[in-house]
Amino acid sequence: MGYTLCVIGCGTMGIAIISGVIDSLQSKDRARSFPKWESHTPGTSTPAVDIESDPSLPSYFIACVTREESARKLGHTFAALGGFGSQVQILVSENVQAAQHADVIILCCKPQQVSSILTEAGMADALEGKLVISILAGVTISQLTALVSPSTKVVRAMPNTPCRIREGMTVVSNLPQSSHADLDRTTILNIFSSIGRCRFLDEKHFDACTALSGSGPAFACIFLEAMADGGVMMGLPRAEALELASQTLQGAARMALQPGAHPAQIKDSVTTPGGCTIAGLLAMEDGKVRSTIARAIQVATERASELGQPSTKK
Ligand SMILES: NC(=O)C1=CN([C@@H]2O[C@H](COP(=O)(O)OP(=O)(O)OC[C@H]3O[C@@H](n4cnc5c(N)ncnc54)[C@H](OP(=O)(O)O)[C@@H]3O)[C@@H](O)[C@H]2O)C=CC1
Ligand SMILES: O=C(O)[C@@H]1CCC=N1
């Protein structure tokens, strides 16, 4: 039997994580049902696994919110996923009961809500010995461990919204020493690798990761919109301009992820001497686009570091 994964604070990111994991489970289930079809189809090499007997995969989900309206919307969202979407139990203001029934808990509430959630009567007992993964920006592991009992294993993760379509980037803090550290590491990798890329990094880098990959989809979409606007200015229909901009950014990013690739080399290969690309690049440099983007990551990092502080304006 798989385990129960509980998301406390199931909003934008909670939905992205559960939806992505369910999509991954369903593609694994299809691979199990149609192994021959899978093995003859290039690019669809999802390994076949027995979901019911794999202890490192969740097979049941609990999503916690406080408002009935949120619960109703979650019901529609998960029902629309079909299959494993029916395995999501939605609870309203029952965080402790959810934690009692869960094996792994992901905290996806706002940073300022975590203290009251973790100090609710019965919560410390419910989390005894369990793995708690916090995706909260700016809230440190030491702040979190002060709110739970010593046997609770706390790690931080910083995912992003593309987890919803299994194209996420998640950074996870190094695990605390424990006899189950290897299993916990596998559990975490199984969750976040199933919905994108996942890597471990020291907690000291978390505010920068929050800004770069956590907030990054928003920054990338500003760039994407601006490219499309330029195309529209030059007469392209809006829908086509957005498609061209989106696929171009995706293609460039995928090239940059190839082993040994470097963005400067990709840029140079596009830039024909005396051609149109260098003309556009110089216009971008005149607009200080590089320092503007880099400074955006800097100020977002600084802001992320404030989000866990009690005195911060939220
Ligand atoms: N959005 C993003 O791209 C990213 C966000 N993060 C982090 O993820 C966290 C959540 O962000 P996001 O998903 O955008 O926020 P949302 O506002 O979309 O989600 C927060 C959720 O928490 C629920 N909630 C509030 N209070 C409680 C409570 N006491 N008990 C249980 N549930 C509660 C809310 O439901 P209801 O209103 O019904 O109570 C809501 O569904 C933040 O800490 C943020 O720093 C990290 C990476 C990326
Ligand atoms: O804006 C925020 O605070 C959160 C953290 C990273 C992305 N969204």
Image (cartoon, rainbow, N blue to C red):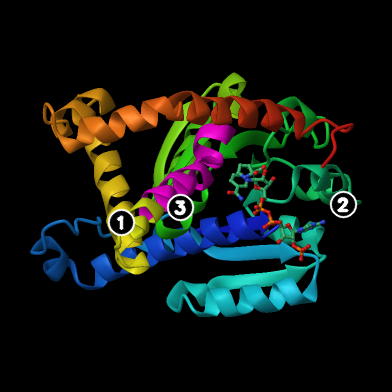
> Which residue corresponds to the image point at 50% horizontal and 64% vertical from the top-left?
19
Q: Position of residue 51 (x, y in %)?
A: 39, 62
Q: Identify which residue is drawn at 84% across, 33% down.
A: 312
In the picture provided, is 50 more to the left or to the right than 173?
A: left
Residue 31 seen in this snapshot: yes
Going by the numbered disc 3, the residue's amino acid type is Pro
Lower position in the chain sequence, tag 3 or tag 2: 2
Splitting the image into 4 quarters, where does residue 130 fall? top right
Task: Kindly identify which residue carries mark 1.
Answer: 234
Q: Is mark 3 within 8 Å of ligand 1?
A: no
The residue nearer to you, when weighing 171 against 121, is 171
> In the rendered structure, are the residues bearing label 3 and label 1 in contact, judged by CB atoms less than 8 Å apart?
no
Q: Which residue is mark 2?
A: 122
Front-most of 53 and 238?
Answer: 238
Percent coordinates x, y for residue 148 in the rendering: 80, 37
Q: Secondary structure at mark 3?
A: helix
Q: Which residues are magenta?
A: 210-228
Residue at mark 3 to residue at mark 2: CA–CA distance: 34 Å
Of the image marks 2 and 1, the number of the one nearer the N terminus: 2
The residue at which mark 3 appears reads as: 162
Q: Nearer the viewer, mark 3 or mark 1?
A: 1
The amino acid sitting under disc 2 is: Gly
Residue 253 position within the rendered picture, expressed as x and y whole percent measured from the top left: 30, 40
Residue at 44% over, 30% down: 287
**Cα–Cα gap, marks 3 and 1:** 30 Å
